[in-house]
Image: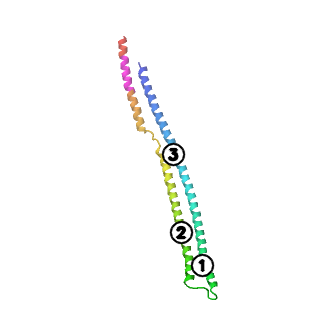
Amino acid sequence: MALFPSLYLAKFFVDASTSTYRQDMETYKVELQRQGAYTQAALNNQLAINSYLHINDEDVLDLKRHNLDRKDLQDSIRRETAKRAALEASAGGSFGRAGNSAELTTLNIERFGLKALARKDLNREIRFRSFEQRRKNVELSTRSKNNLAFSNLSISGDRTGLALEILGSGVQSVIDAKRGTETRQIIGGLLR
């Protein structure tokens, strides 16, 4: 007679062990996923840093080129103005050529040179904004990739749920044992 209730008790312990093992495996799986997400986020962040460094290097080189081009244009304006002044001075004898025509020629040289400088500055401003936008895009892309890495994480069951599952299994085992014992007694009584 004592063997029959012991089987229900053994079933309860197996159910409880199975529930605990399943909970532990779910927790382990969740931790592996989380570690993978952290690793992926670290890689994404390192790629973003590398992109920032590359964009910053490009920006610095572009600024250096811009400054050199700007200096070349300024030198060219001075050179052309000086050359024109030398031509005007040599064309008119001891006093050189003077007047509106000579002044307008010099002003035209300066005007075209200043327009070229203004275009150069505008182009630099456009490139600067492009570098800024690329930096923002790298940041947004990294955030998006990190969100994706963490959005697919599972959550493990809590210990309260596990305790309730084991308790429920115990209650069910008691009910089953009571029914089984009663059924056995009824069958045993009929067989006598």
Q: In the image, which is nearer the foreground, mark 2 or mark 3? A: 2
In the rendered view, how is the structure colored? Answer: rainbow
Q: Pinpoint residue 72: horizontal percent, then vertical percent.
A: 61, 71
**Which residue lies under the disc numbered 2?**
119
For the record, the magenta segment spans 173-185
Q: Pinpoint residue 48: horizontal percent, then vertical percent.
A: 54, 54
With 1 as the anchor, is 34 left or right in this view?
right
Picture quarter with the C terminus:
top left
Q: Residues within 10 Å of mark 2 (few under 14, many from 20)?
A: few
Which of the 4 quarters of the picture holds residue 186? top left
- Residue 52's tag is none
Q: Is residue 125 magenta?
A: no
Q: In what element is the residue under mark 2?
A: helix
Q: In the image, which is nearer the foreground, mark 3 or mark 1? A: 1
Picture quarter with the N terminus:
top left
Q: Is residue 184 magenta?
A: yes
Q: Pinpoint residue 52: horizontal percent, then vertical percent.
A: 55, 57
